[in-house]
Amino acid sequence: MQQSEATYTKTTASQNNAKGGLFDWLYTDIAIDLGTANTLIHARNQGIVLNEPSIVALNLENQAVAIGHEARLMHEKTHRKIRTVRPLRDGVIADFEVAEHMIRGMIKKVKVKWYSSTRKMVVCVPSGITEVEKRAVRDSAEHAGAKEVYLVDEPMAAAIGIGLDVHEPVGNMIVDIGGGTTEIAVIALSGIVYSQSVRLGGDELNEDIINYFRRNHNLLIGERTAEQVKCLIGSAAPLDEELELTVKGRDLVNGVPRTRIVTSKDIREAISESVNTIVESVTKSLEQTPPELSADILDRGIFLTGGGALLMNLDKLIMETTDLPVHIAEDPLTAVVRGTGKVLEDLEYYRAILT
């Protein structure tokens, strides 16, 4: 009976959404995954329409001269008249004014009709953010033109994005590893039973790699190079065949450009402390999970989403530590925005999960 009622509720909500309004064509409803490293936008009935770095290039008058990919190309290569700013740190807005520039500019990129305005905006946020930080997100979205703003927790959006039924009385554990935060949550009955937001993610791993080169090779490398090293040869556990890479940077002793060859083992050691912190947080979350939900997680396993899920052998390390099955989501980078998009498409059905 309960299943029939749930099916009826979803069908009714979907039918109501499908009817739409007379002036719907005047509006662009969007869902945003406002990430520390990347911002993704889902437009109603269009799917994912934008995936760009969360970075803005500003001139001396603090006017945005480039946003997203264009600004990323300028990063660490600018002169004194242009600076690049990443307005989000640790998953939350650190620079309110620049974040507003970025949101407005990215919305402008996805609008296909010049006369349309943004009516509804669903934004995902870290589960551990404060009310003040939530207010900053709402204000930025409203100043960027949204009439109605809804917030959804990142791990909840990730669970919906990978196809889990969050309304069921069944426990699911989501580990969403982003650029600034790692979100760990146990979800059941449209709510988060337990959550932990660790302010550590891909950016921290990049910083570990930069420090490794400075300390061990007297070589100064930038964020972009560190990110490339992490993606190409970074790993959480030993590989079947270790990799190596030639890295370019500036010699700290004589100041001239130099190259160094590093192996995946070197990089694994460089990022091991941060990776272990993530794994320990997963273990701690399992310890705090109610026993009935723990039984569900034993059957269903742990789901990894976010860009950090692509770190080689991270799933293997978590599996060895917890003795539980670990699944990497299909296309983990877009899991959160896909879930946020589903919430946007059927707001009534997902009303209970909005924060």
Image: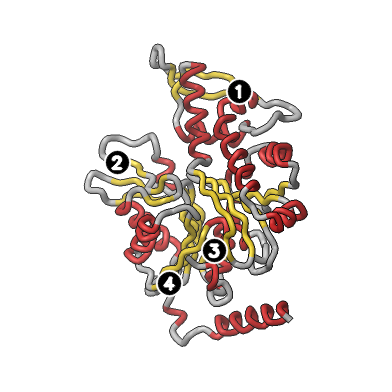
Q: Look at the numbered discs 2 and 1 and tell me whether their residues touch, using CB distance below 8 Å.
A: no
Neighbour tally class for label 2: few under 14, some 14-19, many 20 plus, Cα within 10 Å = some
Amino acid found under the numbered disc labelled 3: Thr
First in sequence: mark 1 vs mark 3: 1
The residue that disc 1 covers is 266
Quarter occupied by the N terminus: bottom right
- The answer to whether residue 333 is above or below residue 148 is above
Q: Earlier in the sequence, mark 2 or mark 1?
A: 2
Instruction: Look at mark 3 in the image and give the residue it sits on.
Output: 340
Q: Earlier in the sequence, mark 1 or mark 4?
A: 4
Q: Residue at x 58, y 40 (%)?
A: 278
Disc number for residue 52: none
Q: Which residue lies at the image location 44% right of the left edge and 23% below the top edge? A: 220
Is the residue under label 4 in contact with that under label 3 (CB below 8 Å)? no
| Foreground disc of the pair 1, 4 | 1
Q: State the residue position of label 4.
A: 113
Q: Which residue occupies 69% across, 50% down?
A: 302
Mark earlier in primary sequence (3, 4): 4
In front: label 3 or label 4: 3
Proximity of marks 2 and 3: CB atoms separated by less than 8 Å: no
In percent of width and height, residue 88 lies at: 40, 48
Q: Position of residue 168 (x, y in %)?
A: 68, 68
